[in-house]
Every structure is written in structure tokens, then in C-alpha cells.
Image: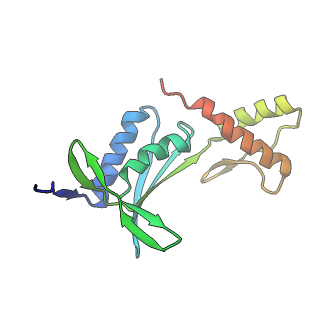
């Protein structure tokens, strides 16, 4: 029996397919999909603000990973994919999801947590990577955990 040949995609076509899958799954969310080459291979990073959770997006990103990595053995092995009966090797070794929260969403969730737990509203910091609360403040750290977890309530697509 003849083995079905494997179609190998480079990183650019892999990123294009990933972008398409994200758009189909999360129509109202804008994603930044960027690839990076390094000595050990190639990866794709996906960034977005608010919208779906990291877990929801990573579930789609994982479908386009071209390799597994075993840190215990320092060993990279190719991932096998079959799409519509066709064997495919995707060009990015890893695909990583990076979610940021906007100032508006973090403020909304933090305000709700402050009301619920009877604490003073914290200062929301705006940074290039998204909104955050002051670091090294136990109240702020507890608040960000609650705000991040409860932000999943804001992820429903229309």
C-alpha cells in the first residue's frame, strides 16, 4: 500500500491558515498573528485584546503547531496532522496565544470585585501590553486574578 505524501507548509502559509481559522471562530475579535525565526526553528505568536480567553484561542492555535518539544530530553519531534484525508506538516514549531485586557474591561471587572469584596478601587495602569494593576500589592494581585478569571464572562461572540 502506498503511503499518502505529506504536504509541508512553511511558516507564512501556516500563519495565513491560522489567521483564517481565528477569524472564523471569533468574528468580532481582531488578532495580530506574527511569526519569528530563531536558531532552533520558527514560531507564531498570536496577540489580541479582550475577546476570547487564552484557553479558547490556544485550542485553535494548537491545531497549527508543527512540532512537540520534550524539555526533559531537549527533543523536538514533528507533529502529525491529517486534514480532510491529507497529511500536513505545519511550518511553525510552536503557536502561542497572548491575551491582553483593555483598561475598560479591567476597570469594569475590578470595580465589580471591589464592590463584591468591599475594598477601595485600585489604580489601573495602561501599558503597551495591555492594562494591569500595581505589582507587589497583595490586594492588587488578588484583584487581577479575580478580574482575569471573571473576564471570561465578556468573551461571548454575537
Q: Toward the viewer: 70 or 8? A: 70
Q: Quadrant of the N terminus?
A: bottom left
In the image, what residue occupies the spot 38% across and 55% down? 65
User: Which residue ends up furthest to the front in the rendered image?
Assistant: 1
- In this rendering, the count of numbered labels is 0
In this orientation, does residue 106 appear?
Answer: no
Q: Residue at x 71, y 38 (%)?
A: 147
Compared with residue 102, is residue 66 higher up or lower down, i.e. above or below? below
Q: Does residue 118 appear to the left or right of 140 in the view shown? A: right
Residue at the far bottom in the pictured view = 39
In depth, the one of 120 and 147 nearer the eye is 147
Instruction: Name the image quarter holding residue 9.
Output: bottom left
Vertical placement of residue 59 versus 44, above or below: above
Q: Residue furthest left?
A: 1
Q: Position of residue 67 (x, y in %)?
A: 38, 61
Q: Residue at x 10, y 56 (%)?
A: 2
Q: Could you say where residue 111 lies in the image, as x and y percent from the top left?
A: 77, 33
Residue beneath the point at 62% across and 43% down:
101
> Can the viewer see residue 117?
yes
Amino acid at each position: 500500500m502506498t503511503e499518502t505524501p505529506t504536504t509541508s507548509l512553511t511558516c507564512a502559509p501556516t500563519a495565513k491558515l491560522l489567521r483564517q481559522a481565528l477569524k472564523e471562530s471569533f468574528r468580532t475579535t481582531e488578532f495580530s498573528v506574527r511569526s519569528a525565526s530563531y536558531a532552533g526553528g520558527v514560531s507564531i505568536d498570536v496577540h489580541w485584546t479582550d475577546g476570547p480567553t487564552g484557553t479558547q484561542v490556544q485550542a485553535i492555535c494548537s491545531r497549527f503547531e508543527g512540532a512537540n518539544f520534550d524539555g526533559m530530553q531537549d527533543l523536538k519531534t514533528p507533529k502529525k496532522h491529517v486534514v480532510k484525508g491529507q497529511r500536513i506538516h505545519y511550518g511553525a514549531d510552536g503557536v502561542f496565544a497572548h491575551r491582553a485586557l483593555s483598561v475598560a474591561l479591567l476597570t469594569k471587572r475590578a470595580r465589580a470585585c471591589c464592590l463584591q469584596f468591599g475594598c477601595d478601587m485600585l489604580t489601573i495602569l495602561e501599558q503597551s501590553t495591555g492594562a494591569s494593576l500595581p505589582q507587589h500589592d497583595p490586594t492588587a494581585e488578588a484583584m487581577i486574578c479575580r478580574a482575569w478569571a471573571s473576564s471570561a464572562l465578556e468573551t461571548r461572540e454575537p
